[in-house]
Image (spheres, rainbow, N blue to C red):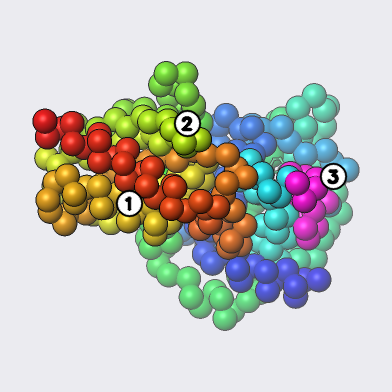
């Protein structure tokens, strides 16, 4: 089983940033309002993610590190309409098979906390441990038992950079959650929870644009908000005056999940080019919302990609929405 988990880990866990992603997404799925991330040596030595979410019962801790034991999917029907970020029940067993791992938690309303250590996939015994309501996952010495993978880890700065990149994309999508990062014992990054814009937790507030993409972008950001054909597109695209756009300032979220999608990226680029008559890269933070049944997120273990049931419709909706919004800036 440890071997199977290590093989699965090859798909889910590439580097410290992928561990951070899986752990933070679990915290969000558990309803966390605040997430603290402690890192050492770019996350290679330590990744500790603490949340104030719903927590796990002591008796359920072994289940959480068991393969394909997800509490988030009860039936095939659910799999068609995945609303949570996780759903494969693969992340924790995978991570625990390639690190010195500990899962500590206390359920809100429960008197006591507990911890379950796992060392290189060998599951230890649940022991009592004081813990505030919520969960802490500790991942030490990533790939310590898989030298071939460890070899591929990069310098501390590089690994930390990947973590910060991912957190930036999360901070854009979840302005309602407080995120704090410490690196080697020092505070490194803090995203405050912001007030909701139009009562919509998913709407990126302008303050957040400023923090993540800088003053130039924030000043030139054109607000997008459009509903039609069962789809909603909202967020921000840089006006033509913004000339620092690059491919790494293209954020796309489908139902709150950060994804790469060629067809949508193409639609944005096409709208930009058709209105502005130049081939410059657009910069954007765009959220596409649709019925979960219209999109398959189960394409890739790390869930970076999605497949739309009606790809053409989605493409044209995005293209037309942006074409109209951008055309107005020229008028
Ligand atoms: P998945 O997220 O796909 O369900 P994971 O391996 O990431 O699978 O997590 C396994 C299970 O452990 C989750 O379904 C959830 O029940 C529990 N769990 C993991 N992390 C947390 C957390 N931070 N708070 C509460 N429960 C958690
Ligand atoms: Mg998960």
329 with respect to 5 (left or right):
left
Density class for disc 1 (Cα within 10 Å; few <14, some 14-19, many ≥20) is many
Q: Contact, CB < 8 Å: mark 2 with mark 1?
A: no
Image point (45%, 40%), residue name: 288
Judge by depth and name the residue closer to the eye, 97 or 90: 90
The percent position of residue 70, horizontal first and vertical second, equals 76, 50
- Residue 163 at x, y percent in the picture: 45, 53
Q: Which mark is residue 202?
A: 2
- Give the quarter of the figure containing the N terminus: bottom right
Q: Residues within 10 Å of mark 3 (few under 14, many from 20)?
A: few
64 in magenta: yes
Asked if the magenta segment contains residue 175, the reply would be: no
Q: Which residue is mark 3?
A: 60
How far is disc 2 from disc 1 in space, using C-alphas?
Answer: 22 Å
Q: Which residue is mark 1?
A: 267
Q: Are marks 2 and 3 in contact (CB under 8 Å)?
A: no
The label nearer to you, 1 versus 3, is 1
- 94 sits left or right of 111 in the view: left
Q: What separation in Å lies between label 1 and label 3 (alpha carbons)?
A: 45 Å
Where in the figure is residue 36, as x and y percent of width and height? 54, 39
């Amino acid at each position: 089983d440890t071997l199977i988990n290590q093989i699965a880990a090859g798909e889910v866990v590439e580097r410290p940033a992928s561990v951070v992603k899986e752990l933070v997404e679990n915290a969000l799925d558990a309803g966390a309002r605040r997430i603290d991330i402690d890192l050492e040596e770019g996350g290679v030595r330590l990744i500790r993610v603490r949340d104030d979410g719903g927590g796990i019962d002591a008796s359920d801790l072994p289940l959480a590190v068991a393969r394909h034991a997800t509490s988030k999917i009860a039936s095939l029907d659910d799999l068609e309409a995945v609303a949570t970020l996780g759903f494969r029940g693969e992340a924790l067993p995978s991570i625990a098979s390639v690190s010195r791992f500990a899962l500590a938690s206390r359920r809100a309303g429960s008197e006591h906390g507990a911890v379950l250590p796992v060392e290189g996939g060998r599951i230890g015994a649940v022991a009592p441990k004081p813990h505030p309501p919520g969960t802490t996952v500790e991942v030490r010495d990533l790939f310590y038992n898989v030298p071939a993978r460890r070899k591929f880890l990069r310098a501390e700065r590089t690994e930390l950079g990947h973590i910060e990149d991912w957190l930036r994309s999360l901070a854009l999508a979840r302005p309602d959650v407080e995120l704090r990062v410490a690196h080697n014992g020092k505070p490194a990054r803090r995203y405050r929870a912001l007030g909701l814009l139009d009562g919509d937790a998913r709407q990126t507030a302008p303050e957040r644009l400023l923090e993540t993409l800088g003053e130039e972008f924030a000043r030139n950001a054109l607000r997008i908000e459009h509903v039609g054909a069962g789809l909603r597109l909202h967020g921000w695209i840089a006006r033509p005056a913004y000339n620092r756009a690059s491919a790494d300032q293209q954020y796309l979220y489908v139902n709150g999940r950060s994804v790469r999608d060629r067809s949508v990226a193409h639609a944005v680029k096409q709208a930009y080019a058709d209105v502005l008559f130049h081939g410059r890269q657009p910069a954007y933070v765009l959220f596409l919302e649709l019925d979960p049944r219209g999109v398959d997120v189960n394409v890739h273990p790390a869930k970076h990609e999605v497949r739309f049931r009606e790809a053409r419709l989605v493409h044209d909706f995005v293209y037309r929405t942006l074409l109209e919004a951008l055309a107005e800036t020229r008028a």
